[in-house]
Amino acid sequence: MKDKSALTIRFVGPDDKRKYLVQRGDFKFWTGDGFSRILDMAKVFRDHGEAATTLAALQYQQYKGLPVRAFKMELSFLLAADDVEGIGLEQIKTYIRTAFKLSVENSVHGDGPVDGSFVQARLHMATLEETVPRRTRF
């Protein structure tokens, strides 16, 4: 990894039984109490959300106290279906929460644009709203 202190989520196993590990840039794995090179000592998460929560807590400990700036960009989802009007907003939110994973490829590019910096991407589900599509057919 580019940054030896960068943290990332690794997945293991087949898609239908995927498990998750938190790994640091020095190739050590989170055990729940610290980091170890021994893979068998790694804490195994059955859910990506649990791994992401742990990752966020570890990153917070690493970068807490630093001043921040915030940026915003648009992300859109296009839904296509025979009965597109029959699919509710809550169904779409549930699908996005479980199927969509937003991540920064920090294992390759580091935690931020310069050493000692950190970029955190967040998806605020409460801001999801329907918009007018740019086209009417897929």
Image (cartoon, rainbow, N blue to C red):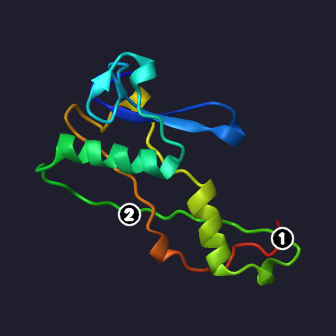
Residue 4, quarter of picture:
top left
Tag 2, which secondary structure?
loop
Residue that label 2 marks = 72
Front in this rendered view, residue 111 or 52: 52
CA gap between label 1 and label 2 equals: 29 Å
**Image coords of residue 6 (percent x, y):** 32, 31
Residue that label 1 marks = 81
Mark 1 or 2, closer to the camera:
1
Number of callouts:
2
Front in this rendered view, residue 80 or 92: 92
Viewport quadrant of the C terminus: bottom right
Does residue 77 lie above or below 117 as drawn?
A: below
- Disc on the earlier residue, 1 or 2: 2
Q: Is residue 108 visible?
A: yes
Q: Is residue 24 visible?
A: no
Does residue 131 lie above or below 3 as drawn?
A: below
Residue 92, quarter of picture:
bottom right
**Image coords of residue 23 (percent x, y):** 39, 29
Mark 1 touches mark 2? (CB < 8 Å): no
**Image coords of residue 58 (percent x, y):** 27, 42
**Image coords of residue 109 (percent x, y):** 39, 30
Task: Identify which amino acid the numbered label 2 is placed on.
Answer: Lys
Tag 1, which secondary structure?
loop
Front in this rendered view, residue 46 or 85: 46
Which residue is at 26% across, 30% downward? 34
Does residue 134 lie above or below 73 as drawn?
A: below
Q: Residue furthest right?
A: 82
